[in-house]
Amino acid sequence: MKVINSSKEFDLISFDSPVAFVPTMGNLHEGHLTLVRYAKKNYSDVITSIFINPLQFGKNEDFSSYPKTLTHDIKLLENLDCDYLFLPEDNFAENLISIKPKFADVLCGISRPIHFQGVLTIIDKFIKVIKPDVCLFGLKDYQQQLIIKDYVNTKKIRTKIISLPTVREKSGLAMSSRNNYLSPSERKHCGKIFACIENLSKDLRESKTLSTVESLKTKGLIHLKKNDFEIDYLEILDADDLSFVTKKTMNFLIAVAVKYRKVRLIDNIVVSL
Ligand code: PAF
């Protein structure tokens, strides 16, 4: 695996196309590795980046304490035969014009007001530097991938955005670097987050009516609170544009964000009726 340490190097390398790009903030887990494996299988050259993007963290968030495990991450990527690892220069996120995202005023955008602007601004920079044919994301961050897809489509950027299913721990807990802040027994307990939205998705499939949406939310909230989760949100929205569900809604997004022992965890399920 070749390590690229500066954006300028991209002009000097002739990549084998199609090129796949997997952006990460490091502390790699099965969720990331699944994206890299998929990329290796389907594209000629695979570039993974590791960059903890300061633009997407709020003032009281975990930017400075975000886990850094570069040596281990490199081993994992080498094991998968990833072709390139891009470790951007320190000033990579400096002097960028902020890009205002669509779909950012709901769900995580409420409690993390600058988050998606920071994500979109850095992804736009990555795409301009790397010019990949495809860029891969996990569906755990449903809102993130929707925002990026919308941006790329609106701006007619030729990079295709591909989203792959959420990878889960045995308990059902969605894989996330933040799971490392929890003990094994806490992680097991947090499997209840997925169990909760899975239950709601079954109810929604069975009832197939709009009127049940509010009562399902209430049921989910009671269940989560009972299990010591501090609720940020539990929402059921139109999965296509994050608007309120209507009679016309075909794809429902059940999305949740909670804190458990101060660790913020998100998850979602899409139900297509
Ligand atoms: O999902 C993440 O890890 C980050 O938001 C991303 C896409 C790497 C941008 O910094």
Image (spheres, rainbow, N blue to C red):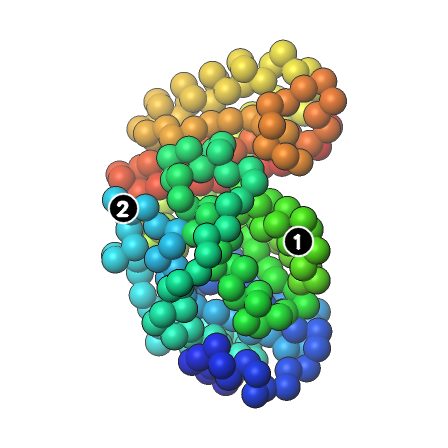
Image location of residue 55, percent across then percent down: 38, 54
Label 2 Cα neighbours within 10 Å, binned few <14 / some 14-19 / many ≥20: few
Q: Is residue 178 above or below residue 83?
A: above
Q: Residue at x 57, y 83 (%)?
A: 11
Is 46 on the left-hand or right-hand side of 26? right
- Label annotation for residue 59: 2
Front-lying residue, 146 or 190: 146
Is 199 positioned to the left or the right of 42 in the image? left
Look at the numbered disc 2 and give the secondary structure of its residue.
loop
Asked which quadrant contains residue 253, the reply is top right
Residue type at mark 1?
Lys
How far separated are the C-alphas under marks 1 and 2? 30 Å
Percent position of residue 143, x then y: 54, 42
The residue beneath circle 1 is 155
Question: Which amino acid, by three-letter code, is at mark 2?
Answer: Lys
Give the residue at x 54% y 15%: 214
- Across and down, in percent, residue 137 comes to 57, 56
Vertical order, 146 against 82 (above or below): above
Mark sitting earlier along the chain (1/2): 2
Do callouts 1 and 2 mark residues in contact (Cβ within 8 Å)?
no
Q: Taking 183 as reference, is 256 left or right? A: right
